[in-house]
Amino acid sequence: MSTHRPRVYLLDVEGTVAPIAFVYEQLFPYARKHFADFLEENFASDPDVQKDISLLFEENYLEREPGVPNMIPGRDEVQGNGLPGNGWSFTMGEPQSRETALNYALWLMERDRKSTALKSLQGRIWKAGFESGELKGILFADVLSALKGWSNHARVAIYSSGSVEAQRLLFRYSIFGDLTGLITAHFDTRTGAKTDSASYAAIAAAMQVEPGEVRFYSDAVHELDPAREAGCETRLVVREGNAPVEDAHDHAVADSFAQEL
């Protein structure tokens, strides 16, 4: 295992800094429970929510899995290899568009899809839960000391399929208090897919470092492989509650951040 210190510590969230159980047993159920009310309150009035819904419609149009809820009338007849031409449009009218958006969002959640639009909407729903105290950011016990130690000599960034807003909420309302001051930057799937090496190169460029100066921590080998391909140093994070990893693909293993200080 390399002993040099990176200039950027890049961290995944689920299964790396936060327990998978917290995401699936608290965050996802909370979003599912409040999705309908959230859309009813914000669908026609909040421009940012409408942007997310617009992206959701585009994702739905490109969806190929059988049984997908259809958000676009006539979708099956006009669907091609890309988005429709300039004449294609949809309305934000109530209540049909809201209902179809809800159905598609819940369908995506059931499949744990890494949908950019869905993750953004989830983050907006979780915001109310964190601010009210219904939700608290559960982090592993070694995260606080690691963030403090790393931020003394380098920068810490987060890269998750969860939206940037959701990431910030997790650390702002964590069980250790507000940790946002220890984190320099946040990245989500708007930067690119976590399975694409170009995403890690883009993050390095955004942080103004070479990829080799970035150390990426994740519990998922299929994310670590493209990070290494981009030139980043990698760590496979092994946590209680994570799925067993049969083949680490020669990534260095870290079962505690304490050994990384």
Image (cartoon, rainbow, N blue to C red):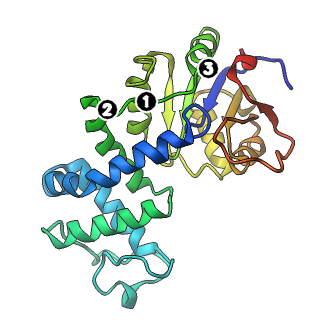
| Residue in the picture at 36% in, 62% down | 105
Judged left or right of residue 226, residue 133 is left
User: Residues under labels 1 and 2: Cα distance?
Assistant: 8 Å
Q: Are marks 1 and 2 in contact (CB under 8 Å)?
A: yes
Question: Tag on residue 130?
Answer: 2
**Amino acid beneath label 1:** Gly
- Indicate the secondary structure of the residue bearing disc 2: helix
Farthest residue, direction bottom: 77
Q: Quarter-wise, where is residue 109 in the image?
A: bottom left
User: Residues under labels 3 and 2: Cα distance?
Assistant: 22 Å
Question: Tag on residue 205?
Answer: none
| Residue in the picture at 24% in, 30% down | 132
- Indicate the secondary structure of the residue bearing disc 3: loop
In-front residue for pair 66/189: 66
**Amino acid beneath label 2:** Phe
Q: Quarter-wise, where is residue 15 in the image?
A: top right
| Residue in the picture at 12% in, 68% down | 94
**Amino acid beneath label 3:** Asp
Q: Which residue is mark 3?
A: 142
**Sequence-earlier tag: 3 or 2:** 2
